[in-house]
Image (cartoon, rainbow, N blue to C red):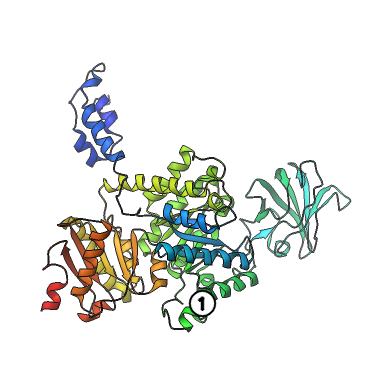
Amino acid sequence: MARPGPKITPADRVHGFFPRSLRRDLGDGPETVDGSDVGSIDRHAMNERLATLLGTADRGNLPPHAKIVATLGPASDSPEMVRRLIEAGVGVFRLNFSHGGLDDQLTRLRTVREAAGALRRPICVMGDLQGPKMRVGQVPDLCPGGGIVVNAGDDVLFRVDHEEAEMNGSGDDVVAVLGTTFDSIFTDVEPGQRVLINDGAIRMLAVERRRGEWLRCRVTVGGRITSSKGINLPESNLSVPAITARDWECVEWAVRHGVDALALSFVRTPGEVLELKEKLEGMVSVEREHGSDPLANRIPVIAKIEKPQAVEQLDAIVEAADGIMVARGDLGVEMETQQVPIVQKYIIERCRHLGKPTIVATQMLETMIESPIPTRAEASDVANAIFDGADAVMLSGETAVGKHPALVVETMRRITEAAEAWLDHLPHTPSEADLPEFRFRSAALALGAWHVVEKAGVKIVAVWSESGGMARYLSQTGFRVPILAFSSSGSACRRMNMLGGVIPVLTDPPADGTLSAWTDHVESLILERRYAGEGDAVVLIAGKPLGSVLGQDAMAILRLGDAGSGFRAYDED
C-alpha cells in the first residue's frame, strides 16, 4: 500500500507561486492549517512583499535595461513624432526597405539625426533589407469584396511570366491562374510540399508541375487573395540569393548615408551573413572618408531568423552575425505556431551563450495599431521576452502605421520596466559566453566585473569602450546594473544603444590622457544625472585607448565622493 504524501496546506498553495528566495521573505507559515483557518497565513507579509515587487518599476533617471526598436512609417516619421518617440524611450529606429523608396528613407534618417542631435541622444538607425520575399503578382478585383476567393479543394495554377491573375484562365478545372515575383517557385517546389499565402492564412499543397513553366496547387485552407501577398515555401530549398539586387542597392545607400546597422532577412546559412559582411568591409562611408569617425564603417549585421533552415544552423549563424533578430512573423508561418515560443527561448539562450545581442520582433503590441491599450496577452509577451533575456523588443506596424505611436512606446517601456523590476528580485548568475581565444581577456574581465558587482553592492559599471567591444562583453555577461559606456566615436555610441543594459556616453578622451581625469568625469556625470548618490560604489573598466596607459585593460572601484578611489591612485603611482 502506497504511503500517503505530505499534507498540502493552503499556505503551501500560496507559497508555491513564488520563487524560493521570495518564500523566505513571506515566511514558511504554520506546519498545518485547518481548511477554515486560511487567515493564519501571513497575508500582511505576503501583500507587503507583492506591493514592494509591483512598486519597484520606477528606476528614477535610469532608462530600462532592454532597448526599444521602433519602425518608422507614415504615422511616425514627422520631426515632432520622432522627437516624442525618443523621449518616450526609443533607442533604435528601423528603416524598413520593404516599404517606401530610398528618398523617403533618407528623409526619415535625417529627421532622426536632427532630433537625436537636439536631444543629445546617440540614437541608432537600423536598415532592414527586404531579402528574397516571394509575393503573389497583381490580382484584379474579380470577386465581390476585392481580389479573388479560393476554397478548400480548388486548384490554383501559378504560371511563369503571368502578370495579372485570372479566374478560370486555363479552361479546365483550375479556379485561378496567378503570377509570382520569383520564378524559383517553378523549379524548387516539389509535388507534396506546402505553399502558403498571406502569412499562412491560405494554405495549398503542390500537386503537379512542369519545371520552369507552371505549378499546380490544391487549396487546403481557402480565403481571399489580393495583390502582393507574401508566399512562403517552408519545405522547399529555394535557389534564390539571400541578397537581391534591390538589397545591394539599399546596402550601398545605407553605407553612403551612415546607417548604423543592417538587418539581413531570410537568412538560411552563415555564408549569407559572411557575404554581406565581406562586402561591407570594402565600402567606405562618408564619415570614414572624411576622417571624422574612423569607426563609422564597422556596420554590424543583424541576422533575422525566420526560416526553419536557419534554426537548424543557428549556432553557426550566430557566430557569423553581430546580432540576431527573432523575426516571428515569417518564422511563425514556416513553423508550427506552437513551436515559435520554444524557438524564441532557444535562440535567446544560444545568443547569450555565444555573446551576441538579440531583438524579439513582430506583433508584440499588435492590437495597439488601433487600440490605445494592449491585450493582457501582449503585455505578457513583451514581459516574457525580457524574462528570456532579450536585449531589445521591436515595434513594427504599431509605430509605422498605427494610431498611437508614442503611446505604444510608452506602454512598452512600462512593461519592460515592470518585468525588469521583477528580475531584479530574483537570484541570477553570470552568462559565461563561449568566446574565441583571441577575445578571452576581455570576456574574463567582464566576468570578473560581474562578481565584483554582486559582492560589493555596486550600483553602476562605467567602461571606456572606444569601439563598443568591451561594452558588448559586459552586456552579454548578464549585469542587472546599468553599464555606462564611454566613447569618442559617435557611430560606436549609436551602435552600443542596441545592447541591453548599456547607456552610451559620447565624450572626448580626457585632455591629459590620465585615468584620474576620466574617473573625475565619470563621477561628475553620474552625480549630475542622479544615476547614483555619494557613497555608492561604481566599477570602472578602462578599455582601449585609456587602458593602454597601464598596458592592458584595467578595473578599479570608485566610491562616489571619495577623492582617493577609482583610478586616481593609479596615476599617483
Q: In which quarter of the image is the C terminus?
A: bottom left
499 to the left or right of 96: left
Q: Name the residue under label 1.
A: 280
Q: Measured from the top left, where is residue 269 in percent x and y? A: 53, 67
- The amino acid beneath tag 1 is Leu
Label tally: 1
What is the residue that sits farthest to the right in this orientation?
171
Judging depth in this view, the residue of 399 and 382 nearest the camera is: 399
Q: Where is residue 466 in the image (x, y as percent from the top left)?
A: 33, 74
Quarter placement of the N terminus: top left
Q: Can residue 264 be seen in this view?
A: no
Q: Nearer the viewer, residue 117 or 284?
A: 117
Q: Residue at x 14, y 72 (%)?
A: 568
* Residue drawn 40% across the image and 59% down it: 350
- Determine the secondary structure under disc 1: helix
381 over 81 or under it: above or below: above
Percent coordinates x, y for residue 6 in the rendering: 23, 27
